[in-house]
Amino acid sequence: MSVNLPLAYGYIRLDLAGHVLTTCEQRMQAFAREQGYQLAAVFHERAPRDATLPQAFIDLIDECRRAEAHMVFTLCGHLAGMATPRTCLLDVMAARGRAHVCELPV
């Protein structure tokens, strides 16, 4: 009998993942399973630009709302160093995407 786990999504900045992108995604997939979630997809953000909210983050918000997914996994540091402060990104995800962001432990 298969168990339907709640959906979750991932968020990775390509400028920080570098050549180990596949390893980062595999780590995120395993962590999601450990936490009782099915990782539906990982959104990839190019290096942050001048935008207030990064485009892949906006797309992630929209997908969380559409799929009624309430959990996002990311790697430590992947919400830092952008035009919008990390705390604001977390607030926007909670308010608009109705999702909680969990940063994987180092």
Image (cartoon, helix red, strand yellow):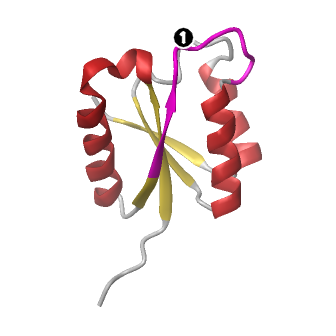
Residue type (three-letter) at the residue carrying disc 1 = Gly
Q: Which residue is mark 1?
A: 81
Is residue 42 one of those drawn in magenta? Answer: yes
Secondary structure of the residue carrying numbered label 1: loop
Task: Quadrant for the C terminus, please.
Answer: top left
Specify the segment rendered in magenta. Answer: 41-53
Q: Based on the displayed image, in which of its 4 quarters is residue 92 positioned?
A: top right
Is residue 12 one of those drawn in magenta? Answer: no
Image spot of residue 26 (x, y percent): 26, 44
The foreground one among 6 and 13 is 13
Image spot of residue 94 (x, y percent): 68, 44
Q: Residue at x 35, y 53 (%)?
A: 32
Image spot of residue 90 (x, y percent): 63, 34
Task: Quadrant for the N terminus, please.
Answer: bottom left
The foreground one among 62 and 104 is 62
Q: Is residue 39 above or below residue 61?
A: below
Instruction: Give left or right: position of 92 versus 15.
Output: right
* Main SS category, magenta section: loop
Instruction: Give left or right: position of 25 versus 57.
Output: left
Instruction: Give left or right: position of 42 versus 32.
Output: right
Q: Residue at x 31, y 50 (%)?
A: 29
